């Protein structure tokens, strides 16, 4: 399996500084105090973690549905990452995935059951 590489660069103080997150795939994005804690422009570690979780889960769910003979037209997953104050620090307290699928021949109950099973196989869940 390939090793994925990411570089994080930070310059300056926490609140006035800025940084860049660089992925080996070519994505590069700025991040700052504002983008992390105040909804400012740029990305942040929590957003990237949410993207990774949503991407992994969606692929794993599509794989499971495909292995059981269903045709996946589209699965869309939105992630909500909760960063909260815990004690004297901060912690990611939960990640909520909201999933919508267009899968031929699958009713809501079957889709939900497959999503529950996917929680066990998605390596980020």
Image (cartoon, rainbow, N blue to C red):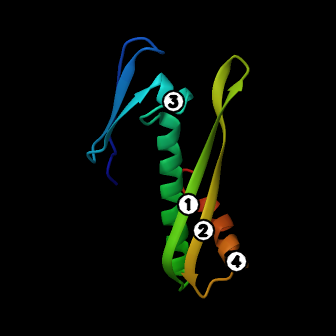
**CA distance for labels 1 and 2:** 6 Å
* Helix, strand or loop under label 1: strand
Closer mark to the observer between disc 3 and disc 4 = 3
Q: Earlier in the sequence, mark 3 or mark 4?
A: 3
* Helix, strand or loop under label 3: helix
Q: Earlier in the sequence, mark 1 or mark 2?
A: 1
**CA distance for labels 3 and 4:** 36 Å
Q: Which of marks 1 and 3 is nearer the N terminus?
A: 3
Residue 49 image point, x, y percent: 51, 43
Residue drawn at point x = 56 percent, y = 80 percent = 103
Disc assigned to residue 100 = 2
Residue placed furthest toward the front: 40
**Residue underneath mark 3:** 36
Q: Earlier in the sequence, mark 3 or mark 2?
A: 3
Query: Are the residues tagged 1 and 2 within 8 Å (C-beta)?
Result: yes
**CA distance for labels 1 and 3:** 22 Å
> In the rendered view, does 86 fall on the left or right side of 75?
right
Disc assigned to residue 17 = none
Q: Would you place residue 35 above or below residue 11 in this image?
A: below
Q: Locate residue 6: give its quadrant.
A: top left
**CA distance for labels 3 and 2:** 27 Å
Disc assigned to residue 77 = 1
Query: Are the residues tagged 1 and 3 within 8 Å (C-beta)?
Result: no
Callout 3 crowding tier (Cα within 10 Å): few <14, some 14–19, many ≥20: some
Residue drawn at point x = 61 percent, y = 64 percent = 99
Residue 42 image point, x, y percent: 41, 35
């Amino acid at each position: 399996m390939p090793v994925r590489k990411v570089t994080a660069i930070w310059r300056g103080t926490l609140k006035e500084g800025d940084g860049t997150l660089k992925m080996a795939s070519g994505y590069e994005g700025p991040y700052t105090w504002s983008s992390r804690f105040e909804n400012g422009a740029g990305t942040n570690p929590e957003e990237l973690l949410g993207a990774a979780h949503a991407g992994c889960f969606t692929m794993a769910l599509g794989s499971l549905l495909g292995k059981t003979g269903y045709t996946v037209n589209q699965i869309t997953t939105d992630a909500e990452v909760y960063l909260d104050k815990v004690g004297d620090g901060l912690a990611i307290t939960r990640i909520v995935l909201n999933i919508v699928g267009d899968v031929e021949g699958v009713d809501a109950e079957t889709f939900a059951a497959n999503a529950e099973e996917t929680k066990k196989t998605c390596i980020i869940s």
